[in-house]
Image: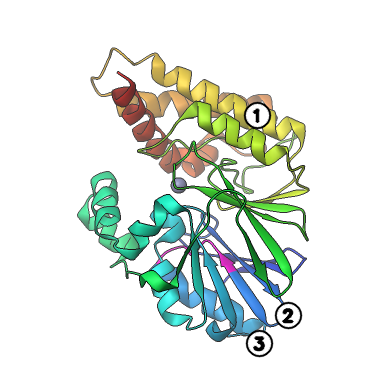
Amino acid sequence: MNTITQDLGQGITLVDAQYGKAGVVAIYLMQQEDEVAIIETGTNHSVPHVKNALREKNLSFENVRYIIPTHVHLDHAGGAGELMHQCPNAQLVVHPFGAQHLHDPAKLEAGTIAVYGEEKFRKLYGKIRPVEAHRIMEAPGFFKIDLNGRELEFFDTPGHARHHFCVYDKQSAGIFTGDTFGLSYPQITTDKGPLIFATTTPVQFDPGSLLQSIDCLTSLQPEVIYLTHFGAVTPTPELTKQLKRSIRRFSNIALDFQTKPQNRVALIQEKLIEYLLTVLKEMGCHQSPEFCEAVIRADMELNAKGLDFWLSKSA
Ligand SMILES: [Zn+2]
């Protein structure tokens, strides 16, 4: 088994969760002397990679003090139960709206099966292991924890999901943003820096809240943003502008189909891809449109499903 890690400095290591393939989902280890926090868990299949990454640092599951999924979507929290089972000294830190779902994952499983279908679900996630209630710590807005003297602060960031928080690390002036600060894949390169865009996954996408949450994050004046999909980016004003523009544009693309429910998901998906490929062309993208489309296609399917749900809900 080939574990892929990247040292990001400040005691922070990216571990590739290898969610289907490499370069899609990041898990972050934060080491403060002999204590470790794990931010994002990937799935059950990612757990051996976390173990290997810890071993590379002469650490083990015993050193893990906190396990912190940014929200309970299963590419972020699917491995939380299994990891908690393996890490005897860890507390699970989760948004108050997500806590119950990780204690009793039945609803979460059912909801995800509704998006992916049973067969794909089992292949991607296996069986979600519940976490005992006494090991769960709920983190509302402005909640703080201490990792061996290192302060982590939680910010409530709805918009992608209501059960989403972001984690501010004072020491690195960095924020672990989960899905709130969008997606940016390093394999897509352009003359004008990284492409970043919003994720509108079902079923709680709310563009107004998402824009507000992004403002909340930028008001902290972070020096680095640790994206789950994928890796560290520098939050320049241009990057933030690009991200916010994608939220408005994606919503407007969906609204064009408000009165046309026929085949809506597929049609929205094509428009989203078309939009991002146009942006990439304007930015002087170095890769072919076919290459870029292959990178973003699955996300745009999920985005289209989320926007379709959002239209139905607001109708
Ligand atoms: Zn998500």
Q: Residues within 10 Å of mark 2 (few under 14, many from 20)?
A: few
Q: Tell me the mark number nearer the camera, choosing from 3 and 2.
A: 2
- Residue that mark 1 sits on: 242
Above/below status of 114 relative to 83: above
Q: Amino acid at mark 2?
A: Glu
Above/below status of 64 relative to 179: below
Label 1 and label 3: CA atoms lie apart by: 41 Å
Q: Residues within 10 Å of mark 1 (few under 14, many from 20)?
A: some
- Residue that mark 2 sits on: 33
- Asked whether the viewer can see residue 1, the reply is no
Q: Tell me the mark number nearer the camera, choosing from 2 and 1.
A: 2
Q: Which span is picked out in magenta?
A: 38-43
How many numbered discs, if any? Answer: 3
- In this rendering, would 250 be left or right of 155? left
Q: Amino acid at mark 3?
A: Asn
Task: Check residue 58 in the rendering and tell me which mark sits there, or answer none.
Answer: 3
User: Which secondary structure type mostly characterizes the magenta part of the structure?
Assistant: loop
Between 92 and 174, which is closer to the camera in this rendering? 92
| Disc with the residue nearer the chain's start (1 vs 3) | 3
